[in-house]
Amino acid sequence: MSDHDVLPLRVYFGVFGTLLALTGLTTWIAYQDFGNLNTTIALVIASIKVVLVVLWFMHVKQSSGLVRIFALSGFFWLMILFGYTLSDYFTRTSVRGWE
Amino acid sequence: MSDATTSGRLAHHFESLEQQHESALLGMWAFLAQEVMFFGGLFTCYVVYRNLYHDAFVEGSHHLDVFLGTVNTAVLIGSSLTIALGVRSAQLGRPRATAGFIGATIALALVFFGIKSVEYWAKYEHGLIPGLAWHPEPGASPQLGIFFGLYFVMTGMHALHMLIGLGLMVVVGWRALRGRYGPDNFIGVEVLGLYWHFVDLVWIFLFPLLYLLGRHAH
C-alpha cells in the first residue's frame, strides 16, 4: 500500500472514539482494587492506545517495511533500556535481602 | 497557487517524488526513535524510583487532580484527531481545511496548557514544587520530592515539546494557507502530524503513571 492512500473518515473517528473510551476505562479501573494487577492493567491499556495511534493516526499500517522498522527501532531500544535496568533493580531484593 | 508548489518539487538528489517523500518520513521516524529514547530515560528513572519508594509515589499521585488529568488526556487525544484530519485534508489537496484543522489543534493545545497551568499553580500554592516552593505537610514521605521532581521534569519536558509543536503548527498552518502543500507534496504536514502524535503518545503513558497508579489503595 502506498502512503498516499487516504484513509476514510470513519477510521479516524473510530480510533478517536476508542481512545476516549480507553481513557475513561483506565481512569475508572484505577479506583477498583485489583491489587498488583492495577499497574499491569493501566500499562496494557496505555499500550493499546499507543498501538492505535501509531498504526492509524501515524499511518504505520500503510507505511513501507523500512518505515516500519524505523518506527519499531525506538521501542526495541527502549525494551533493552528497560530490560537491562530492571533486571538489575528488580532482583536486588532476592540477592541482598532488602526489607 | 502555481504548479510548482502544488505538485511538489523534486530535489535533484532524489529519483522520484515517492522516494523523496519516503526519505523525509524515514528521517522523521529516526528522529522520533531518538525522542523515544530521550523520554525512555525519564520513564526508566520513574520505574526505578517508584519501585524503591513505592509509598511516596502513591502519596504523590494522590496530590494530583485525576479529573483535570483525564480531561487533559481527552483534549490531547482530540488534538491528535484534528491534526490527523489536517494531514488527511492535505493529502486530498484542501489547503483551507488543512489550515483549519491545524488551527483547531492549536486551540486544543492551548486548552491543554490552560489546564496544565491550573494544576501547576495548585502545586505552587500547596508548596509541592521542589526547589521553588517546597513545604509539604508535616508527616509527608521524605521521598515525596523525588515524585514531584520527576513529575515536573516529565510533564515539563512534555510541555516543552508541545510548545515547539505549537510553533511548528503556526508555520505549517501559514504555509498551508499560502497553498504550499498539495496531494503530491504534503510531507511537511505529515511530519508535523507525526511529531504531534508522538507528543500525544508520551502523555498517554505519563497520565496513568503519574495520576492513576496507586489510586485504589486509599
Image (tube, coloured by chain):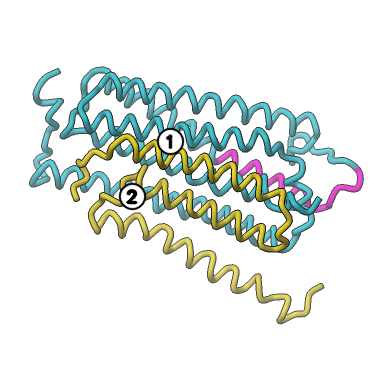
Chain colours: A yellow, B cyan
Residue at the spot x=47%, y=22% of the render? B107
Task: Respond whether the residues carrying marks 2 and 1 are from the same subunit.
Answer: yes
Please report the bounds of the magenta region as a residue range.
Answer: B138-157
- Nearer to us in this view, B124 or B56: B56
Residue A67 drawn above or below residue A11: below
Residue at the spot x=34%, y=24% of the render? B171
Which element is circle 2 on? Answer: helix
Q: Chain of mark 1?
A: B
Residue B98 drawn above or below residue A55: above
From the image, which quarter does the C terminus of chain A lie in? bottom right
- Nearer to us in this view, A73 or A31: A31
Crowd band around label 2 with a 10 angstrom C-alpha radius: few (<14), some (14–19), many (20+): many
Label number found at residue B29 = 2
Q: Earlier in the sequence, mark 2 or mark 1?
A: 2
Which element is circle 1 on? Answer: helix
Q: Is residue B210 left or right of residue A81?
A: right
Q: Position of residue A54 (x, y in %)?
A: 39, 49
Q: Position of residue B161 (x, y in %)?
A: 48, 37
Q: Nearer the viewer, mark 2 or mark 1?
A: 1
The part of the image, by quadrant, that contains residue B106 is top left
Residue at the spot x=28%, y=37% of the render? A8
- Residue designated by label 1: B80
Residue B167 drawn above or below residue A8: above
Q: Position of residue A26 (x, y in %)?
A: 60, 48
- Nearer to us in this view, A49 or A14: A14
Residue at the spot x=62%, y=73% of the render? A88
Which residue type carries mark 2? Answer: Trp
Q: Is residue B87 left or right of residue B14?
A: right
Magenta residues, dominant SS class: helix
The part of the image, by quadrant, that contains residue B4 is top left
Q: Chain of mark 2?
A: B
